[in-house]
Amino acid sequence: MEEERKEVKLMGRNMSKMPCFRETFLYSVSSGLAAGFLHFMLTSRIQRSANLAVATYGCVTLGYWFYCRYNYSVQKFNIGQLEAAMQKQALYEGTEMEKQIKRDA
Amino acid sequence: MATWTYLGFQDSASPLMEQLIFFHDHIMVVLIMIITFVGYMMASILTNSFINRYMLEHQTIELIWTALPAVILVFIALPSLRLLYLLDEVNNPSVTLKTVGHQWYWSYEYSDFLDAEFDSYMTPTNELESSGFRLLDVDNRTVLPMNTQIRVVITAADVIHSWTVPALGVKADAIPGRLNQSSFMMSRPGLFYGQCSEICGANHSFMPIVVESVNTNSFLNWISSYSD
């Protein structure tokens, strides 16, 4: 049984349903905290550690978001092409068109 | 459809609306980042008790906070322009629907098919079934086939109205003496609700739109029975 994700709403939009949103902020918040904590443990400089934590959070958010959304759109495009091809295959099965497509391929 | 206090987008029923929602999500993340960064800077400044007596014409920071917003805007503008041109793409619609706005109802014409035409009035609340949606249900729904490109030509007979179906990402003004064209494709079956979106008189809020998306066979059966 799939576990239901808790709804997180911002301005009426359910954030948990946005593709890549949950993973992006999981990775960015955790990497920001880790980077800030590690820097503090090494240097004991509070403000610089906090600045590093926020900067890491920002960079990871933007970086992972663009990467994840790009992959998502490529996957979506491929799925759409696959669906169209499957529909065409069902349509042309057993006809001359199918033989011609196989010859061309 | 939207219930009361509904703030966000309705679930998309067309590929274009899906892309609009994706663009909105993209902008939302960029905005969250900007607000986080600005909020952090404000908190940092408020908790800082140091004063820099020699801070004058710091060229590096000026360069950064001029160039960075420009870069952010580029990352917003590129998907925006892509979507803008995507919405205007020319495709080959199979079905044409003519929509005419009146005070205070919509009339529809299917000229491709034996000139089927009908009026669509809101179902009054006192005649509504217990399962009906108040101020949204109509007597005659606009039945259209799914997974088919549809062209809708919109005009009005009296004052300016606006034909809107949020789930499909369609909104176009109905202007007397002018034909506005919009195009969409419904990717799933169902009922999609909209309301007139341009003030047009006393009953402006009481002329809804209901699009019923069905498979091609059901649509053909419906249109042939309607033409009869």
Image: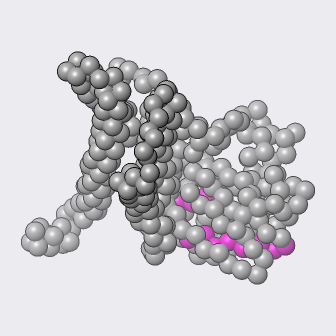
Image coords of residue B148 (percent x, y): 47, 63
Q: Is residue B213 positioned above or below A98 on the image? A: above
Image coords of residue B7 (percent x, y): 63, 40
Q: Is residue B151 magenta?
A: yes
* Position of residue B72 in the picture relative to residue A80 (left or right): right
Q: Residue at x 87, y 55 (%)?
A: B203
Q: Which residues are magenta?
A: B141-158
What predominant SS class does the magenta segment belong to?
strand
Image coords of residue B112 (percent x, y): 59, 75
Asked which quadrant contains residue A99, the reply is bottom left
Image coords of residue B27 (percent x, y): 47, 50
Q: Residue furthest bottom?
A: B177
Q: Is residue B36 positioned above or below B106 on the image? A: above
* Position of residue B23 in the picture relative to residue B111 (left or right): left
Q: Residue at x 39, y 37 (%)?
A: A21
Instruction: Please name whichever residue, A79 or A70, is drawn nearer the observer in this view of the structure.
Output: A70
Image quarter (top left, top right, bottom left or bottom right) of the N terminus of chain B: top right
Q: Residue at x 76, y 61 (%)?
A: B198
Q: Is residue A48 positioned above or below B211 on the image? A: above
Q: Residue at x 30, y 27 (%)?
A: A49
**Residue B174 appears in the picture as rendered:** yes
Q: Is residue B61 magenta?
A: no
